[in-house]
Amino acid sequence: MRYIGNKTKLLQFIENTIKEFEPNLEDKVFCDLFSGTATVAKHFKSKCAKIISNDYEQYSFILQRNYIGNTKDEDFTSLIERYDNVAGLHGPLTEALSPGGKEGRMFFTEYNAKKIDGIRDKLEKEKSSGIINDNQYYFLLCSLLESADSYGNTTGVYGAFLKKFNTRASGKLVLKAYQPELCNTKSKIFKGDSNVIIKSISGDILYLDPPYNNRQYSSNYHVLNYICDPSSINIKLNKQNQESKTALGTYNISKYSRKAEALKTFEELIANSSFKKIFVSYNDEGIMNLEDVKGVLEKYGTYHLRTKEHKRYKSNKETVNKSVIEYIHILIKEEQWVSKQLSILTRHIEKPVVKTKPKPLLSFSGSVGRDSY
Ligand SMILES: C[S@@+](CC[C@H](N)C(=O)[O-])C[C@H]1O[C@@H](n2cnc3c(N)ncnc32)[C@H](O)[C@@H]1O
């Protein structure tokens, strides 16, 4: 999937760096706390004993739930043909995202939007009547998200659509299978704010890939969230009572995307983490500079840095093809900080101090037996 900050091209760099400091991964708990497309968590799935992953966007939860949460040996691909042959339907996605709707938006052709609506409708019906189970549901929804994204009439993000349907968007959507790697790795998947989730987890390796500029994922990929849940479509109106041109509704604004808040939020995350080894992907164009990140990490243990030159993500052909320096900041957390956090975590588990009911967080535990936290 085309995604700002997707780490596909940096996986080897990330793996080499992690292995330099933690050569034996087989019995380790690995956490990807800003998972996005789940690319990094997926890469480490068969290499580690357990994967914890999280992101606060719904589409990311669906990708993680399929790629990381689905582990059993199930025949997923045979479902695809049945779903690919579904009849098109003029539903909420056709209305909001295609020329078939009253606003005439052009994120998808009318044919493709109707097909997405048709598949979406069948998925809910078959899930509620028990024809498909949860694992199959998430596999199919993930496959729909990935397939639909490859027919999106955009330059890569859904902040705008193109005025004419381009070649990739004009083709007739074919539902492809996006199969998870099948292995017995335990998993725990969350959909929540990383700074909240961190307080309830512990493990060996914490991989952090927070946003590095002020572009909001939530408003650049809202269309994917609509596909995940068409009932969440709630388009903003302007002062003249006109709907947002890009079908935007309310969206998450990350503290990591705000200069005034990023560093403080990052430090809070590091302080609250119960992981011995922490790896942070960032680059030289990020809103926190190298010295700031280093300064925070050094307070909690031994600091290292690894760098690599990398071509910048382009969502627009006119963007100059410039290189950026990719960083991996490494913190080997001092025992006192890890154990301090662990004791707080244990106290919370034994005797919850929060009296008010916490907001429900979407989470899935695919672990077999007792959790490590
Ligand atoms: C740089 S991207 C991660 C990319 C990912 N490593 C990949 O390869 O696809 C940052 C991610 O952080 C998520 N995010 C931003 N702020 C967050 C927060 N406070 N809590 C949880 N997730 C957050 C965004 O939704 C986005 O997916």
Image (cartoon, grey):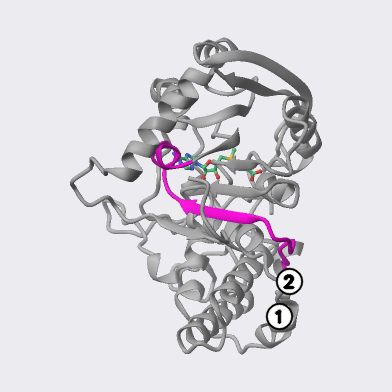
**96 to 354, vertically: above or below:** below
**Is residue 296 at all visible to an observer of this figure?**
yes
Given the current orientation, which residue lies at the most extreme left position?
355
Name the foreground residue: 184 vs 272.
184
Image quadrant where one finds the N terminus: bottom right
**355 to 142, vertically: above or below:** above
Residue at point 57% right, 75% down?
Answer: 137
Task: Provide the residue span drawn in magenta.
Answer: 176-201
How many labels sit on residues? 2
Left or right: 115, with 258 as reference point: right
Residue at point 67% right, 56% down?
Answer: 185
Specify whether residue 226 is painted magenta: no
Q: Name the residue under label 2.
A: 177
Q: What element carries label 2?
A: loop
Amino acid type of the residue that numbered disc 2 sits on in the rendered structure: Ala
Name the foreground residue: 272 vs 293.
272
Q: Mark 1 points at which residue?
A: 80
